[in-house]
Amino acid sequence: MASVPPPSAARLYRANRFVSLPAELDPDTYDTSPEKRRAEAERLAIRSRLKRQYLLQLNNPSPPAVIEDPALLRWAYAKSQNVYPTFRPTPKTSFLGAAYALGPLVFWIFVLKADRDCKEKRIQEGKYKRPFSVFF
Amino acid sequence: SEMSADMLPGPYPRTPEERAAAAKKYNMRVEDYQPYPDDGMGYGDYPMLPDKSHYERDPWYQWDQPDMRHNWGEPMHWQFDMYTRNRADTSPTVVPWHTMSKHFFIFLGTMLVMFGLGTIYPSYMPVGPKQYPFDDLYLEKGGDPSKKPPPVIHYEI
């Protein structure tokens, strides 16, 4: 009967969305295959082209007032104006919309009403001392 | 801005050609490009980048924008304003997260339980009322000096 090998250090570390895996435990660090090298070379080629465009604008003798970053513009557009066209009512989005929009409203309605009813009951029974009196 | 509509983010890519065009638009490799899942939450074709904060980016590399550790034209994370170096930090910790949280919550829970028990069942050395001299401080407490103070005996034989 083959025994299960002990869990790897990366598995023991249990990276989640608050911490990421250290590079020493990540098997990708020790991967030196040609595919990885080709991928890195392609990324570097993209990076070099972008850097060339950026430096051409930066070292221009009459540079533009602001060097616009298309990535920043795309990010701003995606977060502000691309949300409504790409939104689609699904069970998940409908539930989340109800929870975030109606939930707090209904909750506070009930809490404040209950609080007022309790105070009214205490006033009727005569147990409530009114604060902020203008008479001594 | 002067960007044409095909340079701006659009709807979720359905065909492989749309995916390739979107990857080219965002300056990414086609294999790297991975959009958010299409569940109508409003992401569109924006790429899903790994959730790593800017603390983890190489401090010694010559970034185009060194304070943001960001290069010109590099696709930004959807929540990049959370991952800047003023805010959330996802750097790997020396101790794993689950160990740290276990230590913390066990300690906190134990201390809270002990304090709660100590409030419900207080325990202290038995004490008696304090004994003052000069007939239980008769003059200091405003007693009449012309009258004789009542005798106070604090002992039993």
Image (cartoon, coloured by chain):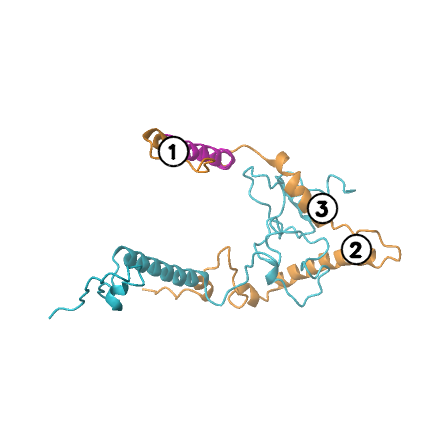
Chain colours: A orange, B cyan
Q: Tell me the element at label 1.
A: helix
Mark before the other along the chain sequence, 2 or 1: 2
Labels 2, 3: front one = 3
Mark 1 sits on what residue? A119
Dot 2 or dot 3, earlier in sequence? 2
Would you identify the image quadrant in which residue A2 lies? bottom left
Q: Quadrant of the C terminus of chain B?
A: bottom left
Q: Nearer the viewer, residue A19 or B126?
A: B126
Q: Which residue is mark 2?
A: A53
Q: Is residue B131 visible?
A: no
Q: Residue at x 33, y 35 (%)?
A: A127
Q: Nearer the viewer, mark 2 or mark 1?
A: 1
Q: Amino acid at mark 3?
A: Leu
Residue B67 in picture, x, y percent from top left: 68, 60
The span from disc 2 to disc 3 (Cα, nearest Å) is 16 Å
- Mark whose residue sits in front, 1 or 3: 1
